[in-house]
């Protein structure tokens, strides 16, 4: 068995479940998305004892359905939200230079000066990208990390994005942002880093009710119920936060992406940025991904009513994304070329505006009437700052025994070391047995769905998922058996 301090697996979980029921901790975190694991890491790095519980699997909800960008807030500049833009640029700097340079790389984003992109949109985009570079400079992010933006020729634009329509193309504006290897992997890596500092990371444990001094919980695989005692409790359940804290009104916004073969757009080396028709502040992005894929997104639609276990894209949203993309392409991408689609729900704090697109992306950290802390809103890029604010409030309001300030601005996340393997499980995705075994032995995967949907992301394409499922299930069973 791998015994490195950051390893998460069923054997460690079994031991720590028993301890969680017996020992009082300083901080109990509810929710295993990026915000929750960020809170667990911040608290553990201050020397506090921590238990995190998650009803499903790590990154089960919104955190795995992002655009996988660590961005500097171009859209916030366009809407005049300079505070959020500055915060995003600062947190991007920390992530790309100190915290997770091994998980993020620079990605070019091309705004084409096409016939369907108006002069107003070209000017707004160019100015915005220039202002974004000013924020980069103020955050002290070096050019070697994020190159300077530049106007490029039509020939260069075509080289970067071969599928562009050449008719009337007048070049474009190229700027750079950060792209995650994978958003779900960031969540798992933050969780592993917290575990290396002593945090208990317990998936498949659902909070039934919260108190200032703990929670009543249920272990999902057995139905066993027990109490977890804590000096402070942090509700980081995202779109489900209102179910545990009635004082908070969450207004979910659905963000949908579609998955294409990158080859259908000429295997581009950069991302494509397409303004919404008539807008200078909203964009659709076409983003290259692993496994020869490309994702196109995203929407921003109200999602009223009961929060689903997993959000589903609508056909209207899929057609909108295709229409937006096809406006600048020489050959339209057809509906039957869409290989997959996914949607996530943003946990926005209801401000009474008409559209979720107009709601601020600033985060909220507040103490409930019951005494626990709730944290929601924000963006994946700013998870670290959200976590710091939540732990600061918990330390203050619950008199936690910590004299340390947050250390996470300079704390590097755990590395990922998967041994090479000759046992190839799937040629199309290059999935190996070693990758699956590592997911089970180190990254906390317990089931075949954990591996396909939240460790390798093969499940984003239904056909890949169906093809790989039988062999992955066999390797998962073998790896779990070896641990128990």
Image: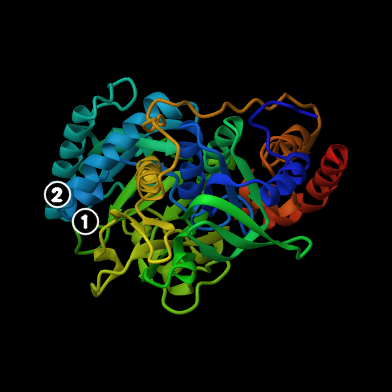
Work out whether residue 169 can be spotted. no
Could you say whether the residue bearing mark 1 is in a helix, strand or loop?
loop
How far across and how far down the image is residue 20, in percent? 67, 48
Q: Where is residue 373 in the image (x, y as percent from the top left)?
A: 41, 56
Whether residues under marks 1 and 2 lie with C-beta atoms below 8 angstroms apart, the answer is yes
Along the viewing direction, whichever of 360 and 118 lies nearer the viewer: 360
Q: How far apart are marks 1 and 2 (CA)?
A: 8 Å
What coloring was used for the rendering? rainbow
Instruction: Using a 10 Å C-alpha cutoff, classify the residue at mark 1 as few (fewer than 14 neighbours), some (14 to 19) or many (20 or more).
Output: some
Q: Picture quarter containing residue 423?
A: top right
Instruction: Give the left or right position of residue 462, taking residue 330 as reference.
Output: right
Residue at which label 2 appears: 124
Residue at image location 76% in from the left, 44% down from the top: 10
Q: Is residue 124 above or below residue 411?
A: below
Task: Return the x and y of residue 366 as percentages of the image width and height.
Answer: 34, 57
> Which quadrant of the figure has residue 14?
top right
Question: Disc 2 on helix, strand or loop?
Answer: helix
Q: Pick the quarter of the image with the C terminus.
A: top right
Picture quadrant of residue 480? top right
Q: Residue 310 carries which label?
A: none
| Residue at the image point whose x is 62% and y is 59% from the top | 55
Of the pair 440 and 117, the residue shown nearer to us = 440
Q: Is residue 308 above or below residue 89?
A: below
The residue carrying mark 1 is 281
Nearer to the camera, 32 or 463: 32
The residue at the far bottom in this view is 305
Q: Nearer the viewer, residue 101 or 373?
A: 373
Q: Which of marks 1 and 2 is nearer the N terminus?
A: 2
Q: Nearer the viewer, mark 1 or mark 2?
A: 1
Query: Is 79 positioned to the left or the right of 23 in the image?
Result: left
């Amino acid at each position: 068995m791998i015994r490195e301090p950051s390893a998460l697996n069923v054997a460690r979980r079994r031991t720590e479940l028993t301890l969680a029921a017996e020992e009082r901790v300083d901080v109990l975190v509810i929710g295993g998305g990026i915000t929750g694991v960020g809170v667990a890491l911040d608290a553990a790095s201050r020397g506090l004892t921590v238990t995190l519980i998650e009803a499903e699997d790590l990154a089960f909800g919104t955190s795995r359905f992002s655009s996988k960008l660590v961005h500097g807030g171009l859209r916030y500049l366009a809407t005049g939200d300079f505070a959020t833009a500055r915060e995003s640029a600062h947190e991007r700097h920390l992530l790309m230079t100190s915290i997770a340079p091994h998980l993020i790389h620079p990605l070019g984003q091309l705004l084409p000066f096409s016939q369907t992109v108006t002069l107003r949109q070209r000017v707004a985009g160019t100015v915005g990208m220039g202002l974004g570079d000013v924020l980069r400079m103020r955050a002290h992010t070096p050019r070697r990390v994020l190159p300077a933006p530049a106007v490029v020729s039509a020939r260069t634009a075509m080289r970067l994005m071969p599928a562009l329509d050449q008719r009337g193309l007048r070049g474009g504006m190229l700027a750079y942002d950060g792209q995650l290897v994978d958003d779900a992997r960031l969540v798992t890596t933050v969780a592993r880093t917290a575990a290396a500092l002593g945090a208990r990371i317990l998936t498949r444990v659902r909070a039934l009710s919260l108190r200032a001094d703990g929670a009543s919980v249920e272990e999902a695989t057995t139905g066993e119920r027990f109490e977890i005692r804590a000096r402070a409790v942090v509700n980081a359940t995202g779109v489900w936060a209102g179910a545990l804290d009635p004082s908070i009104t969450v207004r979910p916004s659905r963000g949908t992406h579609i998955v294409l073969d990158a080859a259908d757009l000429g295997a581009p080396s950069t991302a494509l940025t397409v303004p919404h028709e008539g807008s200078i502040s909203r964009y659709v992005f076409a983003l290259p991904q692993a496994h020869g894929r490309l994702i196109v997104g995203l929407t921003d639609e109200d999602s009223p009513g009961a929060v689903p276990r997993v959000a589903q894209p609508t056909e209207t949203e899929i057609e909108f994304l295709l229409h937006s993309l096809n406006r600048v392409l020489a050959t339209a991408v057809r509906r039957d070329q869409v290989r997959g689609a996914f949607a996530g729900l943003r946990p926005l704090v209801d401000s009474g505006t008409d559209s979720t697109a107009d709601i601020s992306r600033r985060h909220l950290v507040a103490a409930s009437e019951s005494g626990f802390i709730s944290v929601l809103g924000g963006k994946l890029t700013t998870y670290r700052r959200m976590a710091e604010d939540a732990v600061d409030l918990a330390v203050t309001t619950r008199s936690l025994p910590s004299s340390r300030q947050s250390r996470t601005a300079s704390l590097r996340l755990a590395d990922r070391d998967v041994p090479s393997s000759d046992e190839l499980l799937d040629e199309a995705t290059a999935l190996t047995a070693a990758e699956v075994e590592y997911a089970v032995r180190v990254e906390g995967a317990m089931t075949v769905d954990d591996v396909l949907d939240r460790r390798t992301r093969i499940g984003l394409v239904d056909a890949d998922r169906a093809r790989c499922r039988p062999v992955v299930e066999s390797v998962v069973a073998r790896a779990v058996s070896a641990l128990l």
